[in-house]
Amino acid sequence: MKSLQVLRHATAVAILAVSLPVVAAIQLSPVVTVGITTPTFLVHAGDVSNRLFIVQQNGIIRVLHPSASLSSQFLDIRSKVLAGGERGLLGLAFHPQYASNGRFFVYYTRVDDGALVIAEYGVSSNPDVANVAEKILLTIPHPTNANHNGGMLAFGGDGYLYIGVGDGGSANDPPNNAQNINVLLGKILRIDVDRSDAAAGTPYAAPPDNPYVNTDGRDEIYSIGWRNPWRFSFDRLTKQQWVADVGEDAREEVDTPIVKGANYGWRTYEGTACTGNNPGQCDPVRFIPPVLEYLHTGGRCSIVGGYVYRGTRNTVVPGTYIYGDYCTGEIFGWDGSTQTLLLDTNLAISSFGEDEEGELYVVDLNGAIWKIEGVGNAITRVIEYYHPAFNHYFVTADRDEIAMLDNATFSGWVRTGLYFNVYSSNAPATVPVCRFFSTAFAPKSSHFYTSDPLECSIVKSNPDWQFEGEVFNIALPAFDTDECPFGSLQIFRLYNNGEGGAPNHRYTTEGFIRDSMIEQGWIPEGAGVGVMGCAPL
């Protein structure tokens, strides 16, 4: 027991400072920048579809396919959701067997009274559209205050659903809910959604080894002493739970591992500091301290929990815990001993997300999703547009150009909803792509991309074409097979043969689009059947 006391004080000395990198350690590439409103969370379904599901505060869930730049509506429960401030549709978790049973779960604040609702839904016969039938599992009264709702749902490695519930709001938890084992506020809950409990009259059951089963206290409780556990996650390798608990006025904290039945301190402690809220109770033997904390300095004020990185692209060192601060937009990394500022952004970070490959994303409450990329191997997204009047396609990775196209500065262009990835810098084993522009076919204009240095040189000498630079990098296919390296897709280049009086090329990674364009008379250009290069996944 003495070791806990030593650990609490040692931790307080060791982890308050955040070290600064000499240069940014990560970069962000845009995934979605239009068509979403106040996103609060992002998650995958675990069904090998590689789709991303985007939770909006207003009560809508949107689905994004890996080959799309525009999302579509998956579920709309706006009529049920009280949204605004810290309220809204806050959490989403897919059942571990979602691929076969189609079950998923949401966490929202209820219209009229702000009560916290955990409800179950199911997918329809269309995998991109949910059924609207709702089954309410759990309702938690949240009277008086609008803040500290928690909002996180996730399944643990044990197959149970974990729920992060805030303390009920106001400042300093006036009713001391977080320490009261007879209320669900200020807790991490754990329930079994595959069984009901007839005796308790609930459509779920409490796992039999939950700490308060068959004793005083609510059966659903897994751990206590939480202020507002807005975001937590499970390390996909070790299954260890990481909880970021939003602080009061002074400190933000991360706790791991989460021990069944343990007390994590609030409102007696804020991080490693005694608050004085519960006089005489600041005995560190009774509580488990955070593994890391930081102070409210430099504008920092609200931690956003993330994920332990387990991706395969070496975006950061595997095993690094990624998290951020909502107020400053900073993204941090924790390597087990040191907090490091990885990137300072101007985003309103509401959440982080993880895809099926273990790569990580940043959710910007202002209406965007960004992917975290390594600096030396940064990947950016090429967005496809179509001009119906010209019957022309156009692709670009330039962020300013994309914004002007989306804002109709260049009139007539609309997104097709398709994209592919490219390297934004001189990554190993890649080549630069030359871009050209021509106004020689007025009123239409033409753009042209090539990764062939000889072709680039030839087009540069043509007075009808203006060289606009080497705009991104791609990998090349194998010389003898036209196959792309593992972890990449073939990019096809197709030419309209000057139809309509102006040349136009279409660039795509979709084989069915290539085949369709060829059937329409377009000419494949490149190795094999139109392979121009290779796009990273």
Image (cartoon, grey):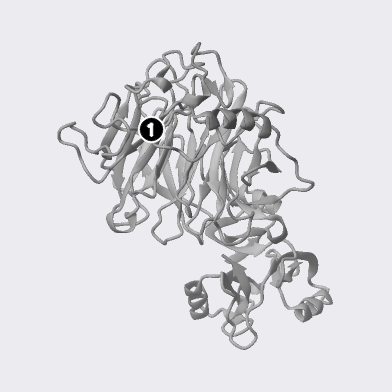
x, y (%) of residue 459?
A: 78, 76
**Mark 1 Cα within 10 Å, few/some/many (few <14, many 20+)?**
some
Residue projecting furthest to the left: 198
Q: Position of residue 290 (x, y in %)?
A: 55, 33
* Location of the C terminus (image quadrant): bottom right
Whether residue 302 is visible here, answered yes or no, is no
The kind of residue tagged 1 is: Gly
**Looking at the picture, does residue 314 appear above or below residue 406?**
below
Residue, disc 1:
261
Q: Nearer the viewer, residue 445 or 231?
A: 231
Q: Nearer the viewer, residue 527 or 231?
A: 231
Direction bottom: furthest residue: 480
Q: Quadrant of residue 274?
A: top right
Q: Is residue 352 above or below residue 470?
A: above
User: What residue sits 29% from the left and 53% below the top?
Assistant: 124
Residue 280 located left or right of residue 504: left
* In-front residue for pair 142/155: 155
How far across and how far down the image is residue 109, in percent? Answer: 38, 29
Q: In the structure shown, which secondary structural element does the residue marked by tag 1 occupy?
A: loop
Residue 507 appears in the rendering: yes
Of residues 110 and 464, the one nearer the viewer is: 110
The x and y percentages for residue 278 are: 49, 13
Residue 505 as seen in the image, left or right of residue 51:
right
